[in-house]
Image (spheres, rainbow, N blue to C red):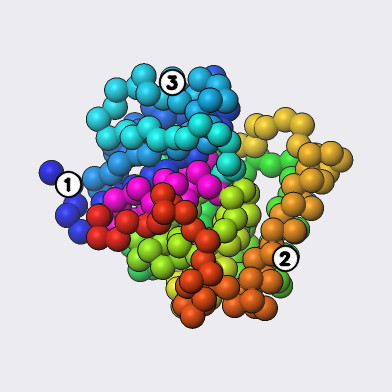
Amino acid sequence: MRKNKSHFLSVIVPAYKQAKTIKKDLRHIYSTLKKIRYDFELLVVVDGTSVDNTYKFAKELKLPKLKVLGYPSNHGKGYALRYGMARAKGDYIAFIDAGMEIDPNGISLILEHMEWYDADIIAASKYHPASQVQYPFDRKIISFGGHLIARFLLGINIRDTQAGLKIFKREVLEKVLPRLLVKNFAIDLEILAVAKHLGFKKIYEAPIKLTYIFEGLHLQGAGFKVVINSLRDALAVFYRLRILRYYDDQNRRRWRFDKELQMKINTG
């Protein structure tokens, strides 16, 4: 029986090469979800079951509300999120990155913000005044660059589009999901831009507790590639949104979504 019949929460965890930590991460998230006042499901989507033992180890966890999903080859974070969203049953659908850089207690907070503001989308933000963030300077520059791209190119008026914790009303994803194309890290930008374009304007930010632990991503090398790839993907979203009008209803026949990624309406 659901704790709250009006709201059922789905939480999606995209995972890639997380074999060393996936059990610990999922247990931590699961224990957090058990404390909230809503019934829930936890869906981990392994982005490449043949890559390592992430899928195998996740399946070994016998948690009653955990669903372990996956597919053989790596397709990118965006694809993993879309795959999970298509199978989520919640009235509210959230995602949180694996790796525990983000404190999963933030799920409860963004859920409360959804209620307080009757929001369409809540995005956890490193720049919220109540956030607790340990973040290196070079990553701040990359994040600020992402903010400028989102603000001036796509008209997204929140300060942090890339933090790996967000929550959506189901109706938002039912409208947005079939139109999406991005398979990698710019999925956040595409969802937010398309949602706003379709009239979902109640998009707000919430605090986050984040400890940045990944090593080796700097402006020289991998970090620079992230900036370039994000800019490229943002330009592609802008082109589809403003020039091609690809995301508009009249272009429905041009949407190139796979059947396995369609939102299953009325299954929540």
As drawn, which residue projects farthest toward the right? 220
Tell me the quarter of the picture where residue 172 sits.
bottom left
Residue 235 is labelled as: 2
Q: Secondary structure at mark 3?
A: helix
Callout 2 environment at 10 Å: few (<14), some (14 to 19), or many (20+)?
A: some
Rendering coords of residue 233 (x, y %): 69, 58
Callout 1 environment at 10 Å: few (<14), some (14 to 19), or many (20+)?
A: few
Q: Amino acid at mark 2?
A: Leu
Tell me the quarter of the picture where residue 68 sits.
top left
Question: Compared with residue 131, is residue 21 higher up or lower down, i.e. above or below?
Answer: above
Q: Disc 1 and disc 2: Cα gap in Å?
A: 43 Å
Q: Which residues are magenta?
A: 78-99
Q: Secondary structure at mark 2?
A: helix
Residue 2 is labelled as: 1
Residue 56 is labelled as: 3
Q: Quadrant of the C terminus?
A: bottom left
Mark 1 vs mark 2: which is more N-terminal?
1
Q: Quadrant of the N terminus?
A: top left
- The reply, left or right, for residue 83 in relation to residue 161 is left
Q: Amino acid at mark 3?
A: Lys
Q: Disc 3 and disc 2: Cα gap in Å?
A: 38 Å
Q: Is residue 90 magenta?
A: yes
Q: Residue at x 35, y 39 (%)?
A: 42
